[in-house]
Image (tube, coloured by chain):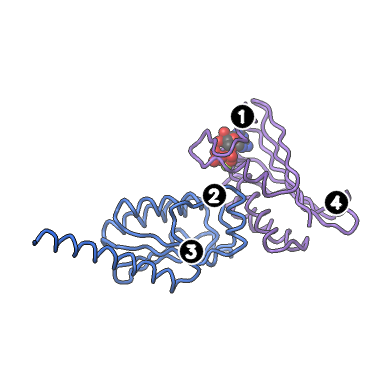
Chain colours: A blue, B purple
Amino acid sequence: MSMGNVERIAILRMGPFLLVTIQVDMHDQLALTLQDDLTAKIEKTGAKGVLIDISALDMVDSFIGRMIGNISSMSRILDAHTVVVGMKPAVAITLVELGITLAGVRTALTVERGMNILRAAIADQTDQLEADDADREE
Amino acid sequence: MPTVKSDTLSLRSEQDIVNVRQVVRKLAQECGFSLVEQTKMVTAASELARNTVTYGKGGDVLWEMLTEGLKKGLRLSFVDAGPGIPDLELALTDGWTSGGGMGLGLSGAKRLVNEFEIETAPGKGTRVTILRWK
Ligand SMILES: Nc1ncnc2c1ncn2[C@@H]1O[C@H](COP(=O)(O)OP(=O)(O)O)[C@@H](O)[C@H]1O
Ligand SMILES: [Mg+2]
């Protein structure tokens, strides 16, 4: 993995979701750029969910861990759900020992399960909105 | 502890931090570390390399592959001539940062290796040495 000169990580739009696949060993600025780009894109597209695939990452240190946490809290503020998928077991074990809990960040093993979590979260929200509307009409 | 081989890498930029991660990964594999052991060593190296670049204003990392009997180990020394760490105990506290980080680099790296040592003095720079055995 030596694609060190990549300046931006692509963000794909899939219906109401944004998809990010991190395939490079990110230098710090690249991680910060991704954080900013994602926030801007959630705002612009009104996306309801963000899926971050880190299955290609061999390491997550405190800097990248903080970026993941930031993306998750910022999307929450913008009314979108975040799921991080594909974290390797060795990475998860190391993160815990490093002291990073990723509290409040939803995780799933595969992209498919991650998508299911996002769909379910949105469906719940829609149900709730419809229930609220029904209450108001009565 | 005989040294099998050693070399020095420069740590001046963010790209150098990425480079150190990749070199340490290869060395850890050569030492026969398991995947989890490799990941721990690479993560510790990433944390300390970033500290050298950000707080130490740049420096070097010296890596040494060691043997002791049949055991193989990897020792990394991160050296800078920056401002030094005035209160080491505080700097080693989980969550303490002077710069807006997560404050888990030093304390976390310490947990990820077998041996951990810091030499530092105000105005005299910092040297952090870690060692992990297979
Ligand atoms: N090489 C260094 N030179 C000077 N100060 C350092 C160095 N490494 C660490 N420090 C100090 O120790 C603190 C804790 O470091 P660390 O645990 O890596 O957390 P963080 O990098 O998130 O601040 C830093 O905020 C900094 O004040
Ligand atoms: Mg640090």
Q: Which amino acid does label 2 sit on?
A: Ile
CB within 8 Å, label 2 to label 1: no
**Chain under disc 1:** B
Q: Residue B83 carries which label?
A: 1
Residue annotated with mark 4: B3
Quarter, ligand 1: top right
- The residues tagged by marks 4 and 2 sit, at their Cα atoms, a distance apart of 34 Å
The answer to whether residue B54 is seen in the rendering is: no
**Element class at badge 4:** strand
Residue located at (29% from left, 68% from top): A123
How many neighbours does mark 1 have within 10 angstroms: few (below 14), some (14-19), or many (20 or more)? some
Query: Which badge, 4 or 1, is on the more N-terminal residue?
Result: 4
Q: Are marks 2 and 1 on the same chain?
A: no
Chain on which label 3 sits: A
Crowdedness near tag 4: few (<14), some (14–19) or many (≥20) residues, C-alpha within 10 Å: some
Single out the residue that lies furthest toward the bottom. Answer: A112
Q: In the image, is residue B58 above or below residue A31? A: above
Label drawn at residue A22: 3
The residue that disc 2 covers is A100
Left or right: A101 as drawn, with respect to B7 = left
Give the letter of the chain under mark 4.
B
Crowding at mark 3 (Cα within 10 Å: few <14, some 14-19, many 20+): some
Residue type beneath disc 3: Ile
**The residue at label 1 has a CB less than 8 Å from ligand 1:** yes
Say whether residue A65 is left or right of residue B130: left
Disc 4 from disc 1: Cα separation:
31 Å
